[in-house]
Image (cartoon, helix red, strand yellow):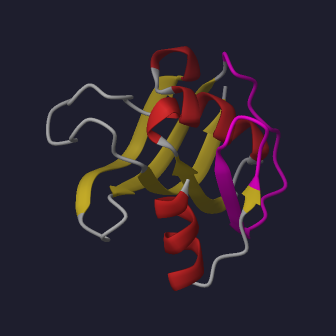
Amino acid sequence: DQELLAYIESHNLNAQKTASGLYYVITKEGTGVKPKSNSTVTVNYKGYFTNDRLFDEGKNATFNLQNVIAGWREGLTYFNEDTEGYLLIPSKLGYGNASTNSIPGGSPLIFSIHLLKVY
């Protein structure tokens, strides 16, 4: 949590914290429907470590929220269609202590997200 709080402060973000420990920031409010935790969505996104190093990005990526990390499954339910913002995900809602691809175990993750469509 300390690492995420330091990131929020250093980037001057107005973040909301949820009961699970997830932080989210809405930078542009959309007006469409909100997804449920089992919805299929299309998003543009970029994934960063807290040192601002990019580790992943996708354009027009479509997937079911049941098939992603818990931080996305919960976090996108706070976004309407056409909303832009950030999810700041503690490692327990990301990949936990397991290293995955280029993501070291225990890493908190930052995602810049534009929710394009909910199906």
Camera sees residue 1:
yes
In the image, residue 54 sits, relative to residue 79, either above or below, namely below
Residue 33 against residue 99 in the figure, above or below: below
Relative placement, left or right, of 118 versus 87 is right
Residue 15 lies in the magenta-colored region? no
Q: Residue at x 61, y 49 (%)?
A: 115
Magenta stretch prevailing secondary structure: loop
- Check the image and report above or below for 33 versus 2: above
**Nearer to us in this view, 16 or 79:** 16
Name the foreground residue: 67 vs 102.
Answer: 102
- Is residue 34 one of those drawn in magenta? yes
- Left or right: residue 22 compared with residue 104: right
User: Residue 38 is drawn in which quadrant?
Assistant: top right
Residue 3 lies, in percent from the top left, at 46, 62
Tell me where residue 64 appears, x and y as whole percent.
53, 20
**Residue 87, position in %: x, y?**
57, 52
Q: Nearer the viewer, residue 80 or 93?
A: 93
Residue range in magenta is: 17-38
Q: Tell me which residue sits at (21%, 41%) in the image.
A: 104
Give the answer, above or below, for where 90 lies relative to 113. above
- Residue 111: x and y in percent read 46, 54
Q: Quadrant of residue 107?
A: top left
Image quadrant for the C terminus? top right
Number of numbered discs: 0
Residue 41 appears in view: no
**Residue ranking furthest to the left:** 102
The answer to whether 56 appears left or right of 34 in the picture is left
Q: Nearer the viewer, residue 41 or 10?
A: 10
